[in-house]
Image: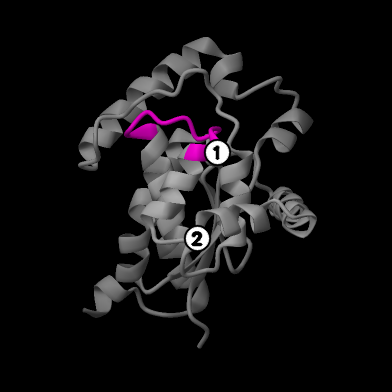
């Protein structure tokens, strides 16, 4: 039997992706699900959908609710007090390129640390020095990593990953895509996505087997 797996599509400027990124590791391990961490860019997808910016900006009433909702959820999950980026959305292209360049073992740690730098510490993730500090804090040779992340091949790889997200039906972040193509959108669908991944692989849920 194949091991259950999901693709975790996330955007660094997405507050709900931040929440999901802090939770998915422990939840997936407990469920026995392998996670493919897939940074991508929502901007091109939003543009195709007719948005001039984030829907949370284009619809202020929705945006105001979102910020309060994320504040509550951060408390609920035991995370530090949430810090709203200003301005929003943030240009997180460099962070996405760096995350994609890192190997599978390093990508989750960098992703969570970068999210916390922005949404818990109020750092500007569009600032190269912030990204450098995140990398250095994880023990990476930051200059080498950032140079490699901005090579043409890696830039094209991020574009391809964004296209793959679009092809999978992704229209927002976070999104979780199971091996059978079933898509789940939103931090609040993470647990359902993991349960479906187990079911799609034909294995008993780890929590039930223990």
Residue 114 percent across, percent down from the top left: 44, 45
Residue 109, placed above or below residue 122: below
Q: Look at mark 2 in the image and give the residue it sits on.
A: 141
Residue 57, placed above or below residue 28: above
Residue 44 percent across, percent down from the top left: 74, 36
Left or right of 195 in this view: 71: left
Left or right of 80 in this view: 115: right
**Residue 189 or residue 71, whichever sits in front:** 71
Q: CA distance from mark 2 to mark 1?
A: 14 Å
| Residue 115 seen by the camera | yes
Q: Look at mark 1 in the image and give the residue it sits on.
A: 128
At x 56% / y 62%, what residue is drawn? 102
**Residue 169 or residue 138, whichever sits in front:** 138
Residue 34, placed above or below residue 51: below
Quick one: label 2 or label 1, which is nearer the N terminus? Answer: 1
The residue furthest bottom is 1
**Residue 145 or residue 36, whichever sits in front:** 145
| Residue 182 seen by the camera | no
Query: Is residue 126 one of those drawn in magenta?
Result: yes
Image quarter where the C terminus lies is bottom left
At x 72% / y 48%, what residue is drawn? 166
Residue 73, placed above or below residue 33: above
Residue 111 percent across, percent down from the top left: 46, 51
Write down the region rendered in magenta.
119-129
Mark 1: few/some/many CA within 10 Å (<14, 14-19, 20+):
few
């Amino acid at each position: 039997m194949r091991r259950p797996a999901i693709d975790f599509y996330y955007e660094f400027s997405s507050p709900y992706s931040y929440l999901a990124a802090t939770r998915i590791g422990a939840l997936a391990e407990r469920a026995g699900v392998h996670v493919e961490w897939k940074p991508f860019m929502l901007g091109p997808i939003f543009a195709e959908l007719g948005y001039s910016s984030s829907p949370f900006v284009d619809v202020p009433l929705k945006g105001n609710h979102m910020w309060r909702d994320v504040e509550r959820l951060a408390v609920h999950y035991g995370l530090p007090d949430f810090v709203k980026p200003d301005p929003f959305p943030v240009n997180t292209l460099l962070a996405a390129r760096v995350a994609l360049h890192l190997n599978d073992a390093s990508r989750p740690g960098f992703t969570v640390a970068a999210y916390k730098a922005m949404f818990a510490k109020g750092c500007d993730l569009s600032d190269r020095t912030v990204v450098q500090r995140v990398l250095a804090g994880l023990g990476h040779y930051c200059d080498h990593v950032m140079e490699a992340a901005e090579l043409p091949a890696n830039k094209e790889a991020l574009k391809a990953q964004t296209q793959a997200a679009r092809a999978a039906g992704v229209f927002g972040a976070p999104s979780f895509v199971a091996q059978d193509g079933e898509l789940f959108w939103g931090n609040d669908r993470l647990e359902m996505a993991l349960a479906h991944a187990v079911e799609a692989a034909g294995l008993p849920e780890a929590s039930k087997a223990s």
